[in-house]
Amino acid sequence: MYDTASMSFAIPYPANAAFMLFLALATPSAAAIFSPQQQTPALEHNRAVELNNQGLALYGQGKVDDAILMYRQALAIDPSFEEALSNLGVALDSQGRDDEAVADFDTALKLAPTDAVAASNRGMALYHQRKYSDAIDAYKLAIQIHPNLPQAYNGMGAALFAEGRVDDAVAAYHQALALSPKYADALNNLGAALNAQQKWDDAAGVFERALALEPKSADIRANYAVALAGAGRDDDAIAVYREVVAAKPADAAAWSALGQLQYKQNQMAGAAESLQKSLDLNPRQPEAEFHLAGAFQSQGKLPEALAAYQRGLALDPANPHALYNLGNAYMAMNNPRDAEAQYRKAVAALPDFPEAELALGAAQASAGELDAAEATLRNLAARHPENPDAQFNLGNVLFNKGRWAPAADAYRASIRLRPDFAHAHYNLGMTLLRLNDAKTAAQEFQAANRLDPSLKPPQ
C-alpha cells in the first residue's frame, strides 16, 4: 500500500485585504462666488474625484480594467491625486501587475509620506512579488505611521510566514486580531500558521471562529480540514472536504486531499473517484497518481494501477515508494522480472530501503535467479540483523537451493527475532524433515499450528 504519511494540502495564505479609499464628492459652498478662472481648478479636482469614485464602484463590481481606466483618467486631470494613485496600485496588483503597482504606491507615498494605507498596500504588492523582506519593511512602515492598522499586521504575518518565521507570523496575526477580533482573514492565516506548527487542535478552534464569520469560505473550510486530519479526525476532515468540493468543484487540490484521506480510511472506490476528478482538473500531480494507483491495486485493478504508476513516475521518476509499489503490482501480475527492475530502481533511489530489498530478493527468487536472490538477502540481513523477514526469505532461497542446514539456521534466526512467526516455524519443520530430524520437526509443526491453525502438519 502506498504510504500516505507525507500527504499535505496547502491553501495559499491570503494577503492582507487592500484598502480602497472611498472619497465623498466635494461640493462648493453655495455662498462662495468664484470667477471662472478661480472655479476651474476646483471643478477639475471634483471631476477627478468623481472618476476615482467611479473606479472604486467598478472595482467593487469586479470590472478591474474599467476601474483602471477611471483611475488613469482621474490622474490625467490631477497627477498629484494620491488616493487615485493608491487605488490604481491596488487594481494593478489584483491583476498581477505588481511592478506597476509598486511604482504607483511609491509615487503615492512621495505625495503623502504618512499614508499608512498606501504603505500597507505597497507591502501587499511586494509580497506578491515574493520580495518578502521588503514587504515586511513596508508593513513595518505602515505600522510605524499607524500602530492600530490590523491589515498591516496581517500582511506582515503573511510575509514572515513566507520567510519561514512561523513564530513571528503567529505573533503578528495575534496583534491583528487584538485590534480586530472578527478579522476573518487574520484568523484564517493564524490557523494556517498553527497548522504549520502542527498545533492541530488549536488551529481547528481558530478555523471554527473564522467560519463563524465567513461560513461560505471554501478556503477557510479547506484549511480547517487540514487541521482536522492532522488531529486524527479523519471522518470529520472527509466531511469538510466534501463541503469544499461541493462549493468549489474545480478545486483539484481539495479533490486530491479528499481522495488521499479516503485512501487512508481504506475507502478505495471513493478514493479512486476523488483522485480521478482531481487529476482530470490537474494532470500534473504525481502524488495523486500514486494514490490512485494504490486504490486501483487494492481493488485488483492491476492494469489501471500500472497505468497510474507510470503516469506518476513520468512526473516523479525517482520516487522510491512508487517504484516499490509498481514492483508489487508486477509481482501480483506474476511478472517477477519487471518487478525486479522496479525494485532495483527503488533501492537506487533510496539505498536504505529494506522493504524494497526484501521484495527484490523475492522477485529474483521467483524468476529463478537463486544466487542473485541469496546475495541480495544476505546483504540485507548483514545490514539489518534485526529483520526477521530477511532471515525468513533467505531461508526460503536456501531451501529451494537444497541447502538444508543453512536454511534451518536462517529460519531459526528468524524465529529468534520473531518467536510468533508461524510460517518460519512451519518452514523450519519442513527443513528438519529433510535433515532427518522428525522429532524436532514435529515440535515446529505444532508451534506453527498453535500460532496459525491453518498451518497443518504434513501427512
Image (cartoon, rainbow, N blue to C red):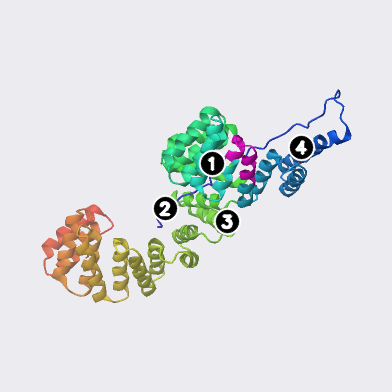
Question: In the rendered structure, which segment of residues is drawn in magenta?
Answer: 104-120
Would you say residue 325 is visible in this rendering?
yes
> Mark 3 = which residue?
277
Q: Is residue 88 found inside the magenta-colored segment of the image?
A: no
For badge 1, the amino acid type reads: Ala
Mark 1 surroundings: few (<14), some (14-19) or many (≥20) residues within 10 A:
many
Q: How far apart are marks 1 and 3 (CA)?
A: 41 Å
Q: Nearer the viewer, residue 233 or 136?
A: 136
Q: Which residue lies furthest to the top in this view?
A: 31
**Inter-mark Cα distance, 2 to 1:** 40 Å
**Residue 422 coordinates in the image, percent (x, y):** 23, 57
Would you name the residue on which mark 2 appears? Answer: 4
| Amino acid type indicated by mark 4 | Val
Question: Mark 3–mark 2 contact, CB under 8 Å?
Answer: no
Q: What is the spatial separation of the Cα atoms under label 1 and label 4, in whole angstroms?
A: 27 Å
Q: Spatial distance from mark 4 to mark 2, Cα to Cα?
A: 57 Å
What residue is at 80 percent from the left and 37 percent from the top? 41
Front position among marks 4 and 3: 4
Q: Do the residues labelled 2 and 1 touch (CB within 8 Å)?
A: no
In the rendered structure, the answer to whether residue 418 lies left or right of residue 71 reads left
Residue 178 in percent (x, y) is at: 51, 28
Checking the image for residue 435, the label placed there is: none
Tag 3: residue type? Answer: Lys
Distance in Å between CA atoms under marks 3 and 2: 19 Å
**Where does label 1 land, which residue?**
138
Q: Is mark 1 on a helix, strand or loop?
A: helix
